[in-house]
Image: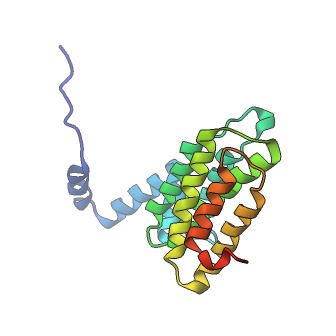
Amino acid sequence: MSPPERKKSNWSSVKAALSQLKQDELLGLLRDLYEVSPSNKQFMEARLRIGANQIAPFKKIVADYMYPDVYKNRPVQIAKAKKAISDYRKAAPSDALGAIDLMIFFVECGNRLTCDFGDIDEPFYDALLSMYAKAVEAVVGLPEPAAEPFRNRLRELTESSKGIGWGYHDGLCDEYYSAFPEEDSE
């Protein structure tokens, strides 16, 4: 005789169960979730804006996967680095500047890796260019005082990528100067 089939849960059933909890039970559940994993802790601290630098754990994840310790034979893991950015966006949806910072940091880490260790491969540069394009688009939408430090970092990436193959440098320049044509003649 097989065990009874469990009904799949969904948000509606979870929400209904949560609404039955008393405040102290709900706080206990949240405490347990907070303590059960580092990712839950990072999510809650970012969402609630607790601590001095909520973005730091997400930057560490991006750095670990986009500039891994090659001497320990750790591979680049683009999907996991992208997931850290996505997780931060979910955790802190109102922090557009933090999300832009992470996107540019993603490209900076990959750019630094290739400058330090040589050309990688086309999918790697495609991922960098795609993230760079998203960052440029986000920066274009910012008011000027907020945009300036990001524009400086984006411009620095175009300058530091000279000599990198796979059309990467040209792609960065195309994105940058299409968005900021006034700098093309500088």
Residue found at x 57% / y 48% = 127
Task: Report x, y in % for residue 136.
Answer: 56, 67
Task: In this rendered view, identify the residue nearer to me: 124 or 95.
Answer: 124
Residue found at x 78% / y 51% = 163
Task: In this rendered view, identify the residue nearer to me: 75 or 126.
Answer: 126
Task: In this rendered view, identify the residue nearer to me: 179 or 68.
Answer: 179
Give the vertical position of 5 relative to 86 (above or below): above
- Residue 175, by quadrant, is bottom right
Q: Is residue 18 at all visible to an observer of this figure?
A: yes
Give the vertical position of 180 relative to 106 (above or below): below
- Residue 70, by quadrant, is top right
Quadrant into which the C terminus falls: bottom right
Tell whether 140 sits left or right of 10: right
Task: Name, please, the residue furthest toward the top.
Answer: 1
Give the vertical position of 159 relative to 151 (above or below): above
Residue found at x 71% / y 62% = 158
Give the vertical position of 69 relative to 20 (above or below): above
Residue found at x 61% / y 69% = 177
Task: Report x, y in % for residue 95.
Answer: 50, 72
